Image: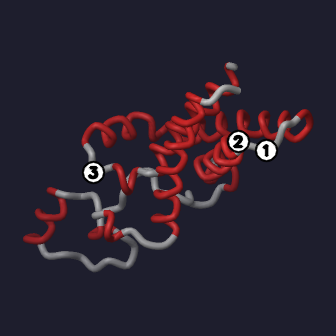
Amino acid sequence: MLMALLLDIANIIGGLLLAIPLLGRFPVIARLTARIAPWRWLVGIVALVAGGYFLIVHLISGPHLFHFEVVGIAVGVILAWERLTGRRPLAPAVPVPASTAPGATTPDPASSAAAHSNPAPSPADLAGPALLVAVFGVIAIIVGIQGLFTPN
């Protein structure tokens, strides 16, 4: 029961952390994720352990593999990627402003003030792996909420 609750909470919190580029526009979510972002690797480890536990339990004793543990393992790997491999993270902890993105030219001071007033890129600017991870974060939130109401 406790492991199932840990898996569901790790899916929800991990999904929030992964979906920062999409959901970071909402002030409540931005404040919440800013407080827990330094602990993203710990949330990832909890998701890996809880998802791995249920993967082993359900493969050995049945009834079958559930999507909760697959999503939990994926969330754990993505969140703990930097700590596990030493490489850059798969998903940024906070959205990168377009003016400070790698390869961006130095803006003039007039546009710099506009960039500081709204530092988060719009969801329309997301592309590639960042968008994929952000959408997966929303899916992980939904799976975590579903897991809270599903009997184990």
The quadrant of the picture occupied by the C terminus is: top right
Q: Identify residue for label 2.
A: 69
Q: Identify residue for label 1.
A: 65
Q: Measured from the top left, where is residue 128 in percent x and y? A: 49, 72
Give residue 143's mark: none
**Label 2–label 1 contact, CB within 8 A:** yes
Q: Mark 2: which amino acid?
A: Glu
Q: Earlier in the sequence, mark 2 or mark 3?
A: 3
The quadrant of the picture occupied by the N terminus is: top right
| Left or right: 142, with 1 as reference point | left
Label 3 crowd (10 A; few <14 / some 14-19 / many >=20): some
| Point 65% across, 55% down: residue | 86
Snapshot colouring: secondary structure
Q: Is residue 48 above or below residue 22?
A: above
Q: Mark 1: which amino acid?
A: Leu
Extreme residue in the left direction: 110
| Left or right: 136, with 98 as reference point | right
Q: Earlier in the sequence, mark 1 or mark 3?
A: 3
Q: Secondary structure at mark 1?
A: loop
Give residue 25's mark: 3
Q: Measured from the top left, where is residue 79 in percent x and y? A: 58, 48
| Point 54% across, 46% down: residue | 140
> Which mark's residue is nearer the viewer, 2 or 1?
1
Label 1 crowd (10 A; few <14 / some 14-19 / many >=20): some
Q: Quadrant of residue 89?
A: bottom right
| Point 64% across, 47% down: residue | 71
Q: Is residue 4 above or below residue 77?
A: above
> Which mark's residue is nearer the viewer, 1 or 3?
1
Q: Mark 3: which amino acid?
A: Arg
| Left or right: 89, with 58 as reference point | left
Towards the viewer: 104 or 63:
63
